[in-house]
Amino acid sequence: MNYVLNEEKMFADVTDGIAIIINSETGIYYGLNQLATAVYENLISGASTDAILDELKSIQGVPVDIESRFNSFIEDMIKAELLIRGEDSDAFARIAASIAQEDNFVMEVKAYDDAQELLLADPIHEVKEETGWTPEKDSIGYTKEETAKREEKLEV
């Protein structure tokens, strides 16, 4: 099975081997540890869950419950709506053994809401797709009448 980032709701960045995924609708952001980030990067590059799991199973010291750990991680990502079903692909999976071993084969996705108000206050959330980066004046919280009154004051 193949998955991709749910770009309708999420945007993501990977820096120094750590992925941060932000839900633009809720303001909740998710942090992935290094192994989870490696799995995520393989997913968005087109590798199937089977290919990734096979790659994990090939790493020295892999625990016997790796399939359960992997499936649980994928389920967590889907439940949080971070991933959605993608088109089938035959892309190869590559995961550095050192990353898997360093994280003890644990794939973590943690949700954070400490910046939720700040992220939701960003005016980009009020921009409508059809207007691009310039929001309609009534989309910033004022009715058309309130906007007209404010503009009258500015013209004086």
Image (spheres, helix red, strand yellow):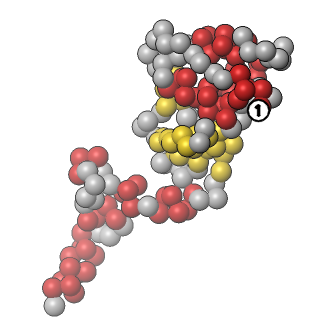
- Left or right placement of residue 89 versus residue 145 in this view: right
Question: How many neighbours does mark 1 have within 10 angstroms: few (below 14), some (14-19), or many (20 or more)?
Answer: some
**Can residue 95 be seen at all in this image of the molecule?**
yes
Q: Residue at x 28, y 64 (%)?
A: 138
In this view, 152 is above or below 42:
below
Residue where numbered disc 1 is placed? 103
Q: Residue furthest left?
A: 155
Residue 109: x percent and y percent?
68, 37
In this view, 133 is above or below 103:
below
Residue in the foreground of this view, choosing between 63 and 77: 63
Q: Residue at x 55, y 28 (%)?
A: 41
Q: Secondary structure at mark 1?
A: loop
Image quarter hosting the C terminus: bottom left
**Can residue 49 be seen at all in this image of the molecule?**
no
Quarter of the image where one finds residue 37: top right
Residue 111: x percent and y percent?
66, 45
- Left or right placement of residue 127 versus residue 36 in this view: left
Residue 82: x percent and y percent?
55, 34
Q: Residue at x 58, y 29 (%)?
A: 40
Q: Residue at x 48, y 33 (%)?
A: 6
Image quarter hosting the N terminus: top right
Residue in the foreground of this view, choosing between 65 and 16: 16
- Left or right placement of residue 85 versus residue 40 in this view: left
